[in-house]
Image: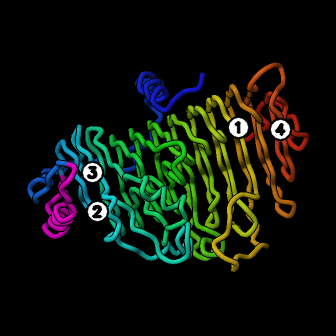
Amino acid sequence: MLFSPFLTLTFFLLFSSSVAAIYSAATCSNIVPLRYRSDRISITDFGGVGDGRTLNTKAFRAAVYRIQHLRRRGGTVLYVPPGVYLTESFNLTSHMTLYLAAGAVIKATQELGNWPLIVPLPSYGRGRELPGGRYMSFIHGDGLSDVVITGENGTIDGQGDVWWNMWRQRTLQFTRPNLVEFVNSQDIIISNVIFKNSPFWNIHPVYCSNVVVRYVTILAPRDSPNTDGIDPDSSSNVCIEDSYISTGDDLVAVKSGWDEYGIAYGRPSYGITIRRVTGSSPFAGIAIGSETSGGVENVLAEHINLFNMGVGIHIKTNSGRGGLIKNITVAHVYVENARQGIKIAGDVGGHPDEKFNPNALPVVKGITIKNVWGVKVNQAGLIHGLRNSPFTDVCLSDINFHGMEGPRSPSWKCSDVFGFAHQVSPWPCSQLSSQEPGSCAI
């Protein structure tokens, strides 16, 4: 029987407390201390009306302006009480907490005429979907520090269907907005909030450091285009834990810029920890790429539960990307009902323009995947390196995939890869030589 997102969410909620107890010692969330804020204001103090019809853009912008300019010691909490608060996009400021009460919904307007345009990210050179600028994220922060988005599992709703339909009908003029984006920011905490129906990527920290995303739920229809869950991008010291994600694209995707623009910008993603994430997607559960031109290093993903997936674990890049992908560890993963268990490929993703250098080849090395159990997996794995830049030090250990039906085991396909395998079933490609325990770097 296939798991629906709602059944899977129920399953996740039931067992998450016990899992958290088992692994309670393992957390990275202390990289950003949670500061006490004595100053507190409510969106209703600024004329906010939670009736689902009144436009609250002026209220949110006025509240943030007050926090920014009064600069109370320790910062300020902006409280959003129960109700549905319709608004256009708005910016946050430093030293603030956006706190959503239980039953509070911040909902994006579907009247798009006033949606701001901003410049492309320099590591992308253009909008991710279309040349030129891009629409600002629904909730946005640029050059900030000490920002918290939290609450009592209130909801941030992007009402993305109008944007998805524009994408399907090819009537978009610029790249769709993310739901929440922080640029050039540090010391960010996002926790205990439900994110739903993002127009594009859900949570996008780019050029950021010290970011914690924990106890969040991210939901979008399975057929919603490009609704990635959490995409750390050219960012460092990022902690993603204890969350449920069911979307139309990768659940978590670590990125670092696109082709010649990402190479020139030269800012890698590193120090990324992903732990105790459960979810469902027609694409990947844990992904690296495909935009990895600034490099991706030192990523740990562990205790991951994936249902109804396209690919369980996907490391993806392409000729023209350049960039170094190394020291990636994925461990303790359960995959149920997937097209592929593991995919590591050097032929994935398009290019921003014709200026990319096809000789800018990525280097992929030091990939460790271990303790993976999969059932109803069509194909165990595919590893396709590049002829002039083979993938090296790929280590697979204690991996067991079971096929969809009957005694036939799912197969592996490999090329241009060197590495090791230990206790992998079905047995992988000849390019991954058999090794004794301990031969793989753990």
x, y percentage for residue 56? Answer: 19, 59
The answer to whether residue 433 is above or below residue 391 is: above
Amino acid on which disc 4 is placed = Trp
Residue at (47% x, 75% y) in the render: 133
Q: Earlier in the sequence, mark 2 or mark 4?
A: 2
x, y percentage for residue 233? Answer: 52, 60
Tell me: 4 left or right of 385: left
Tell me: 257 left or right of 220: right
Q: Which mark is residue 88?
A: 2
Residue at (28% x, 42% y) in the render: 154
Give the residue furthest to the bottom. Answer: 355
Q: Which mark is residue 412?
A: 4
Q: CA distance from mark 3 to mark 2?
A: 10 Å
Q: CA distance from mark 2 to mark 4?
A: 48 Å
- Under tag 1, what secondary structure? strand
Which corner quadrant holds the C terminus? Answer: top right
Q: Which mark is residue 182?
A: none
Q: Earlier in the sequence, mark 3 or mark 4?
A: 3
- Under tag 2, what secondary structure? loop
Q: Which mark is residue 106?
A: 3
- Crowding at dot 3, Cα within 10 Å, few <14 / some 14-19 / many 20+, comes out as many
Q: Earlier in the sequence, mark 3 or mark 2?
A: 2
Q: Which mark is residue 339?
A: 1
- Under tag 3, what secondary structure? strand
Q: Earlier in the sequence, mark 4 or mark 1?
A: 1
Task: Examine the structure image and report whether residue 22 is included in the region drawn in magenta.
Answer: no
Amino acid on which disc 2 is placed = Glu
Amino acid on which disc 3 is placed = Ile
Amino acid on which disc 1 is placed = Arg
Can the viewer see residue 55?
yes
The residues colored magenta run 52-78
- Frontmost of labels 2 and 4 is 2
